Image (cartoon, grey):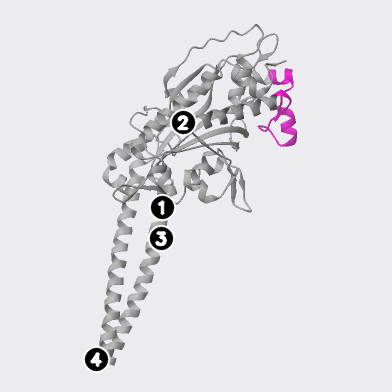
């Protein structure tokens, strides 16, 4: 979440940043934060003064007793009891103000980076790179939801029978290509210096708050209400929370983790052809990369992550583009996000397969994730994450772009992992 010091020192830019992010009543909310903080500081000062007076009175009582002035000592004790009651009231008021301030800050999004363009939604996003789109489809080429039926590799109806819409069953070579993609992505990450993590797929409320899924995305997550656990929307959440309440030795930075996991998203209200087949699911597989940097190095890490994801797509021989999200399309916790989109030829659509984001100190402040500087002070770190990659839409593009009369040709880089060259 945003730091009070930043809001106070840079109020105008914070308000303008929130407006760029289409945050309603930005000025009003920031003024509420500052007013609550002022009340909190005044209450803390009053409490500190009372405690100092109580300590002084305690010393005075001891001196009066030594001097045999029992009646004056009793008067002082009465005053001390009154000071204690006042202190208790102030502590309760301070706790209430701190809780109100914290709740308000939890509901204010991160501030966009200056490079983030103005805009309302995805139409205003900025294409900053696109490789050559050259896909020769034969006449009668099928979208992936028809191809998977033709080759019996993914069964949407069976998934609907077992669970519901958005929970497909992968079969035969469909299951094997899923495993091939996961292993390829993990091996590539290990070669790039990432350390592999296998995290839980359930998180507690503290973890959701730490990375900003709560309270912003509570309605998009599946919840186990009896235990108050949530199914993860991405491995970013448990992996980043490994470092919650930590002070990292600077010599161990940057941290680079990779994790494969199932991901779960309710995607409430998603209907239409744009979510057909693998385009949007409630359960899907994803390999996630997470980096943690000092502030001065985080944008080097961000650009490295973008190039890394683009390298994966190049190896898969997929047409892709890199898109910088505008303020109105930017996620709640992100200060900058670049989406990688692949072209699915049979649909004639660009499909997002990765979002690489820098959160700067926003998550770290919630997580109390810090490092120690040379002068022994602690500073907040920067957190980053990206999909490398999300499987469903990658698979959709692979199937559609590589289909022919013979079948679907597997990209060369995946053949050693899949154990076959064609789906036919």
Give whichever of discs 3 and 1 has the lower sequence position: 3
One can see residue 247 in this view: yes
Dot 2 falls on a residue whose secondary structure is strand
- Left or right, 275 with respect to 328, comes to right
Q: Which residue is at a point 56% across and 10% down the rendered structure image?
A: 135
Give the spatial CA distance, label 3 vs label 2. 37 Å
Residue found at the very far left of the displayed protein: 67
On the image, numbered disc 2 is attached to which residue?
A: 356
Q: Which residues are magenta?
A: 147-173
Q: Say if mark 2 contacts mark 1, CB within 8 Å.
A: no
Quadrant location of the C terminus in the rendered image: top right
User: Residue 83's image quarter?
Assistant: bottom left
Residue that label 4 marks: 67
Callout 3: SS: helix
Given residues 224 and 302, the one toward you in this image is 302
For the point 38% across and 44% down, the residue is: 250
Give the residue at x 36% y 35%: 297
Residue sitting nearer the eye, 395 or 86: 395
Q: Which mark is residue 387?
A: none
Q: Earlier in the sequence, mark 2 or mark 1?
A: 1
Q: Which mark is residue 102?
A: 1
Of tags 3 and 2, the one toward the viewer is 2
Contact flag, marks 2 and 4 (Cβ < 8 Å):
no
User: What crowding class fits label 3: few (fewer than 14 Cα within 10 Å), some (14-19), or many (20 or more)?
Assistant: few
With respect to residue 312, does 240 lie above or below? Answer: below
The residue at 73%/18% (across/down) is: 151
Mark earlier in primary sequence (3, 4): 4
Relative side of 227 to 237, left or right = right
Q: Are marks 3 and 2 in contact (CB under 8 Å)?
A: no
């Amino acid at each position: 979440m945003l730091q009070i010091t930043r809001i106070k020192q840079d109020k105008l830019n914070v308000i303008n940043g929130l407006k760029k992010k289409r945050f309603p009543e930005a000025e009003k909310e920031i003024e509420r934060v500052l007013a609550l903080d002022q009340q909190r500081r005044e209450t803390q000062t009053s409490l500190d003064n009372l405690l100092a007076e109580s300590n002084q009175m305690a010393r005075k009582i001891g001196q009066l007793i030594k001097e045999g002035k029992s009646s004056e000592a009793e008067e002082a004790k009465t005053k001390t009891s009154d000071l204690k009651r006042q202190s208790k009231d102030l502590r309760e008021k301070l706790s209430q103000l701190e809780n109100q301030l914290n709740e308000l800050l939890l509901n204010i999004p991160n501030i966009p980076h200056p490079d983030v363009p103005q805009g309302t939604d995805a139409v205003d996003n900025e294409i900053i790179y696109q490789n050559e789109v050259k896909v020769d489809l034969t006449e009668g080429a099928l979208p992936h939801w028809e191809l998977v039926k033709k080759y019996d590799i993914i069964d949407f109806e069976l998934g609907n029978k077992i669970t519901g819409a958005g929970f497909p069953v992968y079969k035969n070579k469909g299951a094997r290509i899923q495993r091939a993609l996961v292993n390829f992505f993990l091996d590539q990450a290990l070669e790039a210096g990432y350390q592999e993590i296998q995290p839980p797929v359930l998180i507690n409320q503290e973890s959701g708050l730490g990375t900003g899924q709560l309270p912003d995305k509570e309605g998009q997550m599946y919840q186990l209400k009896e235990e108050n656990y949530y199914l993860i929307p991405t491995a970013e959440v448990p992996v980043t929370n490994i470092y919650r309440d930590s002070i990292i030795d600077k010599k161990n930075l940057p941290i680079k983790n990779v994790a494969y996991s199932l991901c779960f998203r309710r995607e409430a209200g998603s209907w239409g052809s744009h979510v057909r087949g693998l385009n949007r699911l409630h359960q899907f597989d994803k390999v996630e990369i997470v980096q943690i940097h000092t502030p001065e190095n985080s944008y080097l890490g961000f650009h490295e992550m973008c190039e890394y994801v683009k390298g994966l797509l190049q190896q898969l021989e997929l047409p892709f583009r890199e898109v910088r999200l505008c303020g109105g399309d930017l996620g709640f916790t992100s200060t900058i996000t670049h989406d990688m989109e692949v072209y699915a030829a049979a649909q004639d659509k660009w499909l997002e397969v990765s979002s690489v984001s820098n959160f700067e100190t926003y998550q770290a402040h919630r997580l109390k994730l810090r490092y120690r500087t040379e002068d022994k002070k602690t500073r907040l770190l920067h957190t980053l994450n990206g999909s490398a990659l999300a499987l469903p839409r990658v698979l959709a593009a692979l199937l559609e772009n590589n289909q022919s009369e013979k079948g679907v040709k597997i990209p060369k880089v995946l053949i050693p992992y899949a154990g076959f060259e064609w789906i036919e």
